[in-house]
């Protein structure tokens, strides 16, 4: 699949995010839109998964540590065929499998239940250690939010991954600079974030998190890095793709109204036409 095809999928995922959160009148569109290109590359270029066999033991694993960003994950899972496309309209509804935070027991393709921030990397460590103990060649990916890097458990897990030389583990930091209460730098500054991960023994790569080619190359570099885990620091824009949502803290956990939804969808469809 070439870059243009991946861009088109990412754009459709963004449309689904907007429609999903509008239908639910709930959810987290900002941090979902920022991660759309990353999940597109993982599911449609990189990860070894089988929608017809979600629990295949040799599959690559994904942990969405920023568990509130389920709209982007459910949209990617639907696009990949793990869940019926029409099911995403049930997002956050009573008795739906697609709840606000992911549930590994209910939703095909969800490898780990998350939502309590800071815990996803620890779970990914366990998967990566299990893979080595079982002599499996699957890889483990974990999507981190930058706000959750303020959690102490992240750094305990970072030490663990380096200590056990988990080179089958790749973390991708969705570094959009905003959290629910404001800019990260004003709430609890995490910079210099790249130096921190290096100091904890990780191989670090910094990229434009909306550049499909850079995401692909970074993942390839991570796969060839031996003896240590890799973190890809992906600089992103919260609300990416919708003009009035970009870099706006208020869209962390706010659903669009009808007028906003229609404007966002119009913009994204125009964006899709420009991709070709």
Image: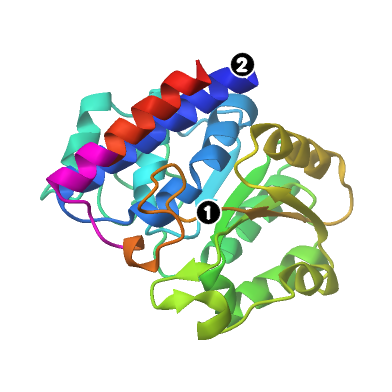
Specify the color scheme. Answer: rainbow
The stretch drawn in magenta includes residue 178: no
- Please name the residue shown 16% across and 53% down the image: 25
Position of 207 compared to 92: left or right?
right
Quadrant in which residue 157 is drawn: bottom right
Q: Are there few (<14), some (14-19), or many (20+) residues within 10 Å of tag 2? A: few
- Please name the residue shown 76% across and 42% down the image: 218
Callout 1 touching callout 2 (CB < 8 Å) = no
Front residue of 56/213: it is 213
Position of 9 compared to 228: left or right?
left
Which residue has dot 2 on it?
1
Q: Position of residue 98 (x, y in %)?
A: 26, 45
Residue 108 appears in the picture as rendered:
no
Count of residue discs = 2
41 up-or-down from 227: above or below: above
Spatial separation of the CA atoms under disc 1 and disc 2: 25 Å
Q: Position of residue 45 (x, y in %)?
A: 62, 26
> Tag 2 or tag 1, which sits nearer the N-term?
2
Q: Residue furthest left?
A: 94
Quadrant in which residue 253 is drawn: bottom left
Q: Secondary structure at mark 1?
A: loop
- Please name the residue shown 72% across and 71% down the image: 193
- Residue 52's tag is none
Q: Which residues are magenta?
A: 253-263
Q: Quadrant of the N terminus?
A: top right
Which residue has dot 1 on it?
237
Residue 199 appears in the picture as rendered:
yes
Q: Residue furthest right?
A: 226
Q: Secondary structure at mark 2?
A: loop
Position of 221 compared to 7: left or right?
right
Q: Nearer the viewer, mark 1 or mark 2?
A: 1
């Amino acid at each position: 699949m070439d870059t243009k095809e991946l861009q088109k999928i990412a754009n459709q995922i963004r449309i689904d995010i907007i429609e999903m959160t509008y239908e639910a009148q709930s959810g987290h569109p900002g941090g979902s839109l920022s991660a759309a290109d990353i999940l597109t590359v993982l599911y449609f270029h990189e990860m070894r998964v089988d929608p017809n066999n979600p629990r295949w033991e040799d599959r690559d694993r994904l942990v969405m540590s920023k568990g509130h960003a389920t709209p982007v994950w459910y949209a990617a899972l639907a696009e990949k065929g793990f869940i019926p496309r029409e099911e995403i309209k049930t997002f956050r509804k009573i008795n739906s499998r697609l709840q606000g935070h992911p549930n590994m027991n209910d939703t095909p393709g969800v490898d780990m239940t998350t939502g309590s921030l800071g815990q996803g990397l620890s779970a990914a460590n366990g998967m990566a250690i299990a893979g080595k103990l079982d002599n499996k060649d699957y890889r483990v990916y974990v999507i981190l939010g930058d706000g959750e890097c303020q959690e102490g458990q992240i750094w305990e897990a970072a030490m663990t991954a380096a200590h056990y030389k988990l080179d089958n583990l790749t973390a991708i930091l969705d570094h959009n600079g905003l959290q629910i209460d404001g800019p990260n730098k004003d709430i609890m500054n995490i910079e210099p974030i790249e130096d921190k991960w290096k100091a904890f023994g990780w191989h670090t790569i910094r990229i434009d998190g909306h550049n499909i080619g850079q995401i692909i190359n970074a993942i390839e570099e991570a796969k060839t890095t031996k003896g240590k885990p890799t973190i890809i620091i992906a600089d992103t824009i919260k609300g990416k793709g919708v003009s009035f949502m970009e870099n706006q803290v208020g869209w962390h956990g706010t659903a669009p109204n009808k007028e906003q939804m229609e404007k966002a969808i119009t913009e994204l469809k125009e964006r899709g036409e420009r991709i070709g």
